Amino acid sequence: MNTQELEILKKQIETLEKKHHIEILKILTQHSCKINENKSGSFVNMSFFSEEIINEIQKYIQYINEQEEQLNTAEYQKDEYRKSLVKEVKE
């Protein structure tokens, strides 16, 4: 993976919620990655990531995105159903 692709992955990770950061840190610790921590947070040098680690992180991010999409779809369907019920009650 080149530097530009790692930068894109980094930005994707940075936009995630804290609970997802924790899951990604779990992935990294399973692979014995060196994690530097201080009062500002946890830091890793992504240039040393193996292809396996990168693939796992990408799969996790894809899973998160799919779940978010499914939740949004379900919310949309609930709203549409609610609107149709209100419309029927008014008629």
Image (cartoon, rainbow, N blue to C red):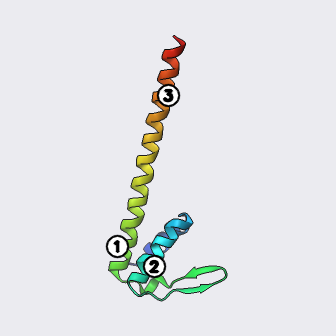
Circles 1 and 3 in contact, beta carbons < 8 Å:
no
Q: Secondary structure at mark 2?
A: helix
Q: Nearer the viewer, mark 1 or mark 3?
A: 3
Residue 9, horizontal then vertical, whole percent: 46, 70
Question: How far is the residue under mark 2 from the one under mark 3?
Answer: 48 Å
Question: How far is the residue under mark 1 from the one under mark 3?
Answer: 40 Å
Q: For label 1, count other residues whose C-alpha is less than 10 Å away and answer few (under 14), some (14-19) or many (20+).
A: few
Q: Residue at x 46, y 71 (%)?
A: 23
Residue type at numbered disc 3: Arg
The extreme left residue here reads 52
Residue 37, horizontal then vertical, whole percent: 59, 85
Circles 2 and 1 in contact, beta carbons < 8 Å:
no
Foreground: 24 or 8? Answer: 24
**Mark linked to residue 3:** 2
Q: Does residue 4 appear in the picture of this structure? A: no
Question: How far is the residue under mark 2 from the one under mark 1?
Answer: 15 Å
Q: Does residue 27 appear in the picture of this structure? A: yes
Q: Residue at x 51, y 15 (%)?
A: 89
The residue that label 3 is drawn on is 82
Q: Residue at x 45, y 52 (%)?
A: 68
Q: Residue at x 43, y 73 (%)?
A: 5
Earlier residue among tags 2 and 1: 2
Earlier residue among tags 2 and 3: 2
Q: Quadrant of the N terminus?
A: bottom left
Residue type at numbered disc 1: Asn
The residue that label 1 is drawn on is 55
Circles 2 and 3 in contact, beta carbons < 8 Å:
no
Q: Nearer the viewer, mark 2 or mark 1?
A: 1
The extreme right residue here reads 39
Left or right: 34 as drawn, with respect to 62: right
Q: Secondary structure at mark 3?
A: helix
